[in-house]
Amino acid sequence: MSPLSHDFERVFAVGTAALLVLSVMAVGMASAGETGGTHDDLAFDPDVPDTDSFTAPPADGTATVDGKTYDTAQAAVDAADPGDTVTLDGRFDETLVVTTPNVTLSGSGPGSTLLHGDGAGDVLAIEAQGVTVADIWVRNSGYDTATNDAAIFVNASDVTVRDSRVTDMTFGIWLDGVDNTDVRNNTIVGREEITQLTKRGNGIQIWKTEDSVIRNNDITAVRDGIYYNWAKDVVASGNTMWDLRYGVHYMYSDDCVLRNNTAFDNDAGYALMVSKHLVIADNVAVNNSGQSGHGILVKSIDDTDIRGNHLVNNENGLFVYNSVSNRIVGNLVVGNDIGVHIAAGSNDETVTKNSFIRNDRPVLAVMGDQVHWNESVGNYWSRANPTDVDDDGIGDTRYQPAGTVQQVTAKKPAARVFASSPAFDAVRLAESSVPVVKSPGVVDARPLTEPPHENWRSYYERD
C-alpha cells in the first residue's frame, strides 16, 4: 500500500473520531427521553384453551374394572391386575396411589372425570411401571413447594399421561428420576391466586429423567412451564406456555431437543442454563418481557444449535451470556428492544442466515474485542443496506451492527437521537471500510441483501 493510502486512512479515521466526539458533546444537550420506538402494532393470536370455563362433573364417581363397580378409585385400582383398564366416571374426592404395573387409568373425558385431592401432598401418585393415565381431571394438590406437592407424581418408568387436565396444584406433573415417559395433550393450570412466583411449582418437572417425550401440552399460571434438572435426551415439542416466569427452563440437562413450542407473555420464553449439546429449533417466543425479558436466554450453554426460531417483540430477542461454540442459524429476530445481547466472553459462535428486522437496537455487545460472526454468508440487517455488485444476494462490504455507535448509545441512551446523523454514519462507514478502525463489537463480514424470512410481516398484519 502506498504512503499516500496510509495517510488517507489515518486522516479518515481521525476525522471520523472528531465527528464522533462532536456528536457525543451534542448528546449532553439532547433530551434523555428520546429513545427507540414501540411495537404496539403486533399481530399475534395464539390458540389456547379457555381455562376459566372448566366445570367439574356434579355426579359422585363410579370406578369399574373387569366388569365390577367400586365406590372409590383406590378400591378399583387395588383390585386391578396388570393389563387391566380401570374406568372412572364422575367425581372422586380422594387421593390415589397406583402400585400395580401396566394398568390403564381411563376417564370419560377431563370434563367428565375428576380426581379431587384434599389439598395436602400429591393427588395421584404412580408407583408402578407401565401405567397409563388418560382423560382425567386431577386437581387440588398440597401447597408445599419444599415437599414437591404435585397433582400427578410419577415415580416409575414407561408411564404415559395424556389428554388430561391438571389444575389447582403446586407442581403439575413431576417426573422423579424415571425414563421413557410420555406426557402429551394435557392442559396444566396452576393457582393464579398465588402471585409470588417462588411459591408456585412448575407445570412439568423433569428431574433426572431420560429418553422421554413432552408434547402438545398447554401450560399457564405456574412458575416455569417445563423445568429440566439433570435430564438427558428429552424431546419437548408442540407445547404452549404463557403467563409464567420461564416458558421452558433447562438446568444441567444435555442432549435435549426443544422444537416447535410457543412461549408468550412470560418473563422469558426459553431459559437455557448450564447445559450442552441442545437442539433449539423452530420455536416461537413473543411478548416476553419483565424481570428477565428474553425470547431465548442462553447462559453457560455450549455446542448447541439454535435455529429456525421466531423471536418477536421481546425485550431481548436472544441473550447470550458466557456461552461458546454455538450455532445460531436461520432465526427471525423482529421487533425486539434488542435483537441480540451478547456478553461475558461469549465467542466462537457461528451466526448466519438470520433476519434482524425492526429491532430498536440490532445488537448490544458487551465486550472488549471485535468478534466476527461469519466469513462467507452473513445475516440480513434491516439497517445495513449493503452494496452487492455481483448481485448474488450477499453484501460486498462488512456491517458492524454493534460497534462504536452502539457502544456510545448503550452508555448514553440520549445519544440514540443522533443514530441517523451524518457523524454516526461516518463512524459506521469507517468501521465497514477502513481496517485501521477496529472498534470492539460484532462484525458481519457478508451481510445479506434480502431477509431469508419472507413471512416476517405476518406478525404485523391484522385481519
Image: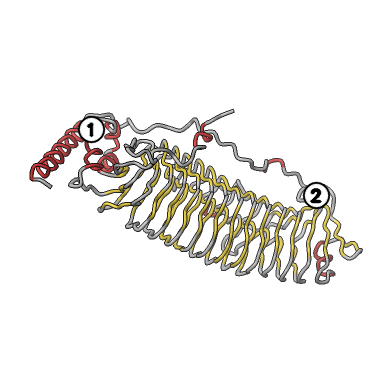
Q: Nearer the viewer, mark 2 or mark 1?
A: 1
Q: Position of residue 359 (x, y in %)?
A: 40, 38
Which residue, given by chain and number where applicable, does mark 1 sit on? 27
Q: Position of residue 26 (x, y in %)?
A: 20, 31
Residue 112: mark: 2
Residue kind at label 2, given as amino acid type? Ser
Residue at disc 2, secondary structure: loop
Of 295 and 412, the residue lying toward us = 295
Residue kind at label 1, given as amino acid type? Val
Name the residue furthest front.
390
Residue 386: mark: none
The residue sitting at 71% across, 71% down in the picture is 129
Question: How many angstroms separate mark 2 from mark 1 (CA)?
Answer: 65 Å
The residue sitting at 83% across, 67% down in the picture is 84
Q: Is residue 375 left or right of residue 42?
A: left
The residue sitting at 17% across, 37% down in the picture is 16
Residue at disc 1, secondary structure: helix
- First in residue order: circle 2 vs circle 1: 1
Confirm or deny contact between disc 2 and disc 1 (CB under 8 A).
Answer: no
Q: Is residue 317 left or right of residue 83?
A: left
Would you identify the image quadrant in which residue 74 lies? bottom right
Q: Position of residue 339 (x, y in %)?
A: 40, 43
Q: Is residue 291 visible?
A: no
Of 399 and 366, the residue lying toward us = 399
